[in-house]
Amino acid sequence: MSVFVSVAAYRDPELAPTVRDCLAKADRPDEVRVVVNWQHLGDEDVSALRADPRVTVLEFDARHSRGVCWARAQIQRHYVDSDWYLQVDSHTRFAPGWDSRLIAMAGRTGAAKPVLTCYPPTYDPAVEFTGGGEPTLIFLSGWTDDGLPRFQHFRIPGWRERTAPVPARFVAAGFLFAPGSFVREVPYDERIYCQGEEINLATRAYTWGYDLFHPVEVLAWHYYVRQGQARHWMDHRTPGADHWHRRDRAGRRRVRTLLRYPVTGGFGAGPARTMADYQAYAGVDFATCSATADTLAGRLPARPAALVG
């Protein structure tokens, strides 16, 4: 089973260790293809990645970067048909056999088009890595002033007793595993800067007929703090069209419009379910910026009815 791995990296010294760990921990590393969007100022050494035939490095001057969604969109343009698609950030560590375990887990969902996603537990490259952590679910913690959902996560109740992934309402862009068809059907909208990325993916995936799940095993770790490291919005503050805040404002407006006034096709909703279907399933109302008590409490949603046809 082939896996296409997307890794977007902005001036990140963890990029090379992340890709090396991804390949080293895979059960079938020769069936893994990694494509990296390396946005840099010449301050990281990726020579080991360039020498690996399983890795493609797309190189961009960081000064010309347009944000994370743009970066992921460039990677997807280099997609070749694969059985599975994995999207991670460039500061990730992997569990042994992550590929076999994710594929098996996807099979246990019973869904035709499963998406496995979560905010992984943390790691720190300055501290000896020992694994650990607990699988988590994503819940709605509130709304921004301009009407976009905010997310947090906490551990899945009773996860040790569970044998199959649990239904999810939302997705995490930093760890997302899906059939390869996801790239063709839910391609990245590079007009989104960062905020709104995850709810845009969740709604579009669901309306394309994908069912959302959280893993009940820890299969990866994420470096969250990254204190003192470069961030896109710190580098792009020059007044004008490339100012990060201008891009962010335009992207947020686009996401908000697509949520409240959905269209089908292009970067809008898919043909399998409606936006109203998603809101009913997730327990949210984008027009009123409200949610059900179950959604606000982080309770697991009921699995959606199987698609017909």
Image (cartoon, rainbow, N blue to C red):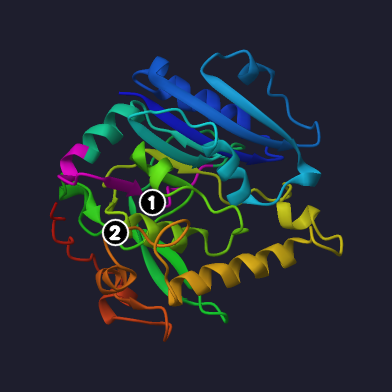
Task: Out of 234 and 107, give the one closest to the viewer.
Answer: 107
Residue where numbered disc 2 is placed: 168
Residue 279, quarter of the rendered image: bottom left
Residue 50 placement, left or right of 284: right
Name the residue type under label 2: Ala
Residue 36 placement, left or right of 25: right
Give me the residue at 79% from left, 56% from top: 236
The circle on residue 258 is none
Q: Is residue 156 above or below residue 37?
A: below
What secondary structure is found at the residue carrying circle 1? loop
Residue 94, quarter of the rendered image: top left
- Magenta stretch: includes residue 120: yes
**Image x and y of residue 85, in percent:** 40, 36
**Image x and y of residue 37, in percent:** 63, 35
Name the residue type under label 1: Cys
Q: Earlier in the sequence, mark 2 or mark 1?
A: 1
Residue 195 placement, left or right of 108: right
Magenta region: 107-123
Q: Is residue 13 above or below residue 69?
A: above
Q: CA distance from mark 2 to mark 1?
A: 9 Å
- Is the residue under label 1 in contact with that under label 2 (CB below 8 Å)? yes
Residue where numbered disc 1 is placed: 118
